[in-house]
Amino acid sequence: MTTTEKAIDDYRICFEKIYPWVDYIVVNVSSPNTPGLRELQEKAFLTNLFRELHQLRSQYGTPKPILLKIAPDLTPEALKEIADTVRECGIEGLIATNTTISREGLVCDIKTLENIGAGGLSGAPVSQKSNEVITQLRQLLGPDYPIMGVGGIFTANDIKQKKASGANLYQVYTGFVYQGPGMVKQLLAGL
Ligand SMILES: Cc1cc2nc3c(=O)[nH]c(=O)nc-3n(C[C@H](O)[C@H](O)[C@H](O)COP(=O)(O)O)c2cc1C
């Protein structure tokens, strides 16, 4: 496993490999499945990482946007720090949110949950948390900052809720797994 000290090297290697092929870059520091990864959401690390990525990016032509993807389990204080960091570092957008480590609101019993074990929950269980994070970010970052809403989008109505919370871009993962590529057409028709 990569140590925190060496994490920037991993991001640098991935950045250089994928940069020519993508429309935008996401720095994902929020997966609950990689031990220690979410500690990288701290300001000092992010500031160093973004400085490094901006330097790399300057070697290419027209700069492609860099976005930061965050967890739904951050405190309001941590969210404020992240909002300050992306502003100060000139990061083009935030993606809220990744999967949650919370088990709140689930109907199955504790024993079953314990047997399933640790890991991130996606889909419906993360929807409301994601919307709450988006609402807080929008308040912190003002009306125009790009916020990509993700977490529990299955229908056009879910997108409307993300929009009402403050998102102005949208991403789907679990919905896509269950509904397949036709989902996009249905979402657009519903909007
Ligand atoms: C199996 C699985 C793998 C994921 N892998 C990634 C990943 O590699 N990078 C990333 O940024 N997010 C990853 N995510 C998070 C999703 O992109 C998304 O943020 C989260 O699942 C909430 O959205 P959803 O409810 O539409 O799935 C993953 C989610 C799941 C369930």
Image (cartoon, rainbow, N blue to C red):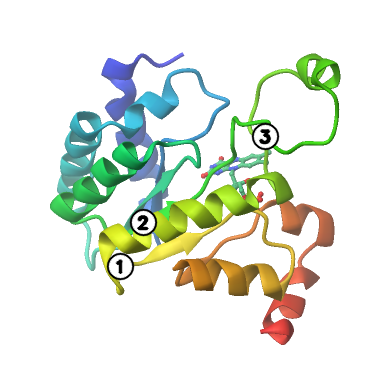
Query: What residue did someone put label 2 on?
Result: 137
Image quarter of residue 16: top left
At which x and y percent is residue 38?
A: 42, 28
Nearer to us: label 2 or label 3: 3
Q: Is residue 12 left or right of residue 156?
A: left
Number of other residues with Cα within 10 Å of mark 2, as a class: few under 14, some 14 to 19, many 20 or more: many
Find residue 75 and report its horizontal and vertical position in percent: 39, 36
Q: Residue at x 36, y 24 (%)?
A: 39
Q: Sequence order check: which comes first, mark 2 or mark 3? A: 3
The spot of residue 167 in percent (x, y) is 46, 67
The CA distance from mark 3 to mark 1 is 30 Å
| 1 and 2 marks in contact (CB < 8 Å) | yes
- Amino acid type, residue under disc 3 in the picture: Glu
Q: Residue under circle 3?
A: 104
**Which class describes the residues within 10 Å of circle 3: few (<14), some (14-19), or many (20+)?**
few
Q: Three-letter amino acid code at disc 1? A: Tyr
The mark that comes first in sequence, 3 or 1, is 3
Marking on residue 145: 1
Q: Residue at x 79, y 22 (%)?
A: 113
Query: Which residue occupies 28% across, 29% down?
Result: 8
Location of residue 4 with respect to 124 vertically, above or below: above
State the residue in front, 104 or 74.
104
**View quadrant of ligand 1:** top right
